[in-house]
Image (cartoon, rainbow, N blue to C red):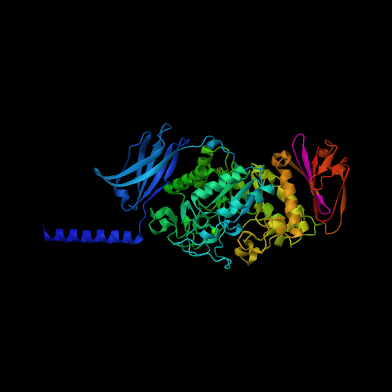
Amino acid sequence: MRKVNLVLILVLIALTNLLSNVNAARNIKDRLEPSSWWIGFKNPVVQLMAYSEDIGLLRPEINHPGLTIKRIIGVENPNYLFIDVLIDEKAKPGVVEILFKDGNKVRKTMSLQLNERKKGSARRQGFNSSDAIYLLMPDRFANGDPTNDDVEGMLEKADRKAPYGRHGGDLKGIMNHLDYIADMGFTAIWINPVLENDMPESSYHGYATTDYYKIDPRYGTNEDYKKLVEMANSKGLKVIKDMIFNHCGSKHWWMDDLPSDDWINYDGFVRSNYRLSTISDPNASRADLKLATEGWFDTSMPDLNLRNELLLNYLIQNSIWWIEYAGLQGIRQDTYPYPDKHGMAEWNKRINLEYPNFNIVGEAWIGEPSKLCYWQKDFPNSDGFNSHLKTIMDFPLMDAMHIAFNEKGGGWSDGLIRLYNVLADDHLYPDVNNMLVFPENHDVGRIFTILKEDPRKMKMVTAFFATIRGIPQWYYGSEILMTGNGYDGHAHIRHDFPGGWPGDEINAFTSKGRTDEQNEMVDYLSKILNFRKNSKAIHHGKTLHFVPENNVYVYFRYLEDEAVMVILNNSDNEARTISGKRFDEILSQYSKGTDVLTGENLSALDSFKIDAKSAKIIELK
Ligand code: CA
């Protein structure tokens, strides 16, 4: 052997050792994702992502009845290998061994659990306008298991005194209070994200995912999550999972060893300009659009590039995995317009293909109906884009609720006319029943604080959100009049629910633990939501409304042979008597009604008396 070759070989050996040392330092943990899948999907191919040192240099092989490898995809990083596996309808359930070979030698084995689908799984009914949703933040709702508050090896420890720390709430805490939620008349829960967020700080909110297939151990296990969904379903509560595809957490396991350079947008932190209008604006510059959709949402949240087909497919399968595994009825997708819109449309289509009655709500935080409508399925956009997203959040209506009840009214466009004006834009939406209607959520000021802590206004906003078209969504704690100013920071609108922690002095989960004022609010909300449960006119009736006059707004929700009349009187201290004459076009079909809130029977509909700062809901027969 010539000397120069020997030197070359020695250098190569040294390099190889160096590389494997780097990998050892990285502590590569073998992964196969998904690690389980099902037989009988409309799309019979599952794409496995295998992660292990130099696995990309090996050749996978499967010998299992009904399974065929269709495609093997290597990427820049040899520690990844993507494998498309075709699953025949008659495939045998059980453990599937995947052999990774180097020539004839098996260097590695991974296993995939193959399951049969539950009967009726594809036909599951997603949430819709017959539902009322209770949104809760799991770290702040109830601590059912103090032993999981701290988990060894995880970066952030519990600290209930820290406003932005982890407080210890968990899945067990939610399970313990499902009856509390169901008794108020809610039929669905949206839980803020529960996937692992092994971040050094502020991990309580859950929006920086570090593992897409694992429930954060401080909330419980994957099994616990599945159990929670079963329990909730058995009590008449659908479950909506909060997901985030725009970004992951900077401590996500793949951030140390990305499959390819184009897995994330930008090499490091570049802040998004958050200008969502650039996506629908025909006049927008490419530079502004790029920054909006490819800039990072926050310093600790790398922006995922959904134009990478492998990543997009990974996330689509991840959603299907959670729906099938846990038995979900819905998904709420965070920061909806920020990722690649075509990838997101594909995601909706693929989920609808497997679950046609499923529902997804996207957080398109846009205050103008003319821009918001771009994002609802089947809107005839001039650029030809169809989002395939069934449900959008009605931020314009939320904004109006925040102002309308605080204004004196009397002008051309203030007071309750704000609500009227937003609804006048309903012609823009392809499906008004699939608008999520909410006075607040976990990102804005507490509605009771916004309404200047006036319980009468709280009641009016409650009557409104629960009877207007769309899918109503409430935020935990507002039923006990929790306060918090959004401008003070997120911690102030995400306080612990009193009574959720062992040793709490007050337990507001029980009527005994609540003040009279709180009980009145809980009772008011419960009465309306329990009535709503059986009102088809509210679920999917049309809306007929009359221009507000003298601070009084009257609208009807109606079907062919039933109707609900709602009267809101926002005047400060004047009771009003309004004549039925003005509403003749609908009232002439009815002769009597029932006041939903008082139970009083109305034998005539020629005039209605309504107290100042109050709402009346009348079921017409
Ligand atoms: Ca706990």
Name the magenta segment's main secondary structure. strand
Q: Nearer the viewer, residue 387 or 516?
A: 516
Q: Position of residue 392 (x, y in %)?
A: 61, 48
Q: Could you tell me which residue is drawn at 50 percent across and 42 percent down?
A: 324
Magenta stretch contains residue 558: yes
Residue farthest along the left direction in this orientation? 1
Residue closest to the eye, 425 or 441: 441
Which image quadrant: the C terminus?
top right
Residue 518 spot, x, y in % from top left: 73, 58
Does the magenta run of residues contain 8? no
Q: Residue furthest top?
A: 90
Q: How many numbered discs, if any?
A: 0
Answer left or right for 514 relative to 294.
right
Q: Which residues are magenta?
A: 548-565
- Along the line of sight, which residue is nearer the eye, 29 or 398? 29
Q: Residue at x 57, y 68 (%)?
A: 162
Q: Quadrant of ligand 1?
A: bottom right
Q: Tell me which corner region of the image, top left, top right, bottom left or bottom right, holds residue 125.
A: top right
* 533 lies left or right of 110: right
- For image coordinates 44% across by 49% down, the residue present is 311
The residue lying at 59 percent from left, 51 percent from top is 175
Q: Quadrant of residue 456?
A: bottom right
**Residue 173: percent from left, percent from top:** 58, 55
Can the viewer see residue 414?
A: no
Which quarter of the rendering shows the N terminus?
bottom left
Q: Is residue 350 visible?
A: yes
Would you say 613 lies left or right of 81 here?
right
- Residue ranking furthest to the bottom: 161
Q: Position of residue 108 (x, y in %)?
A: 30, 47
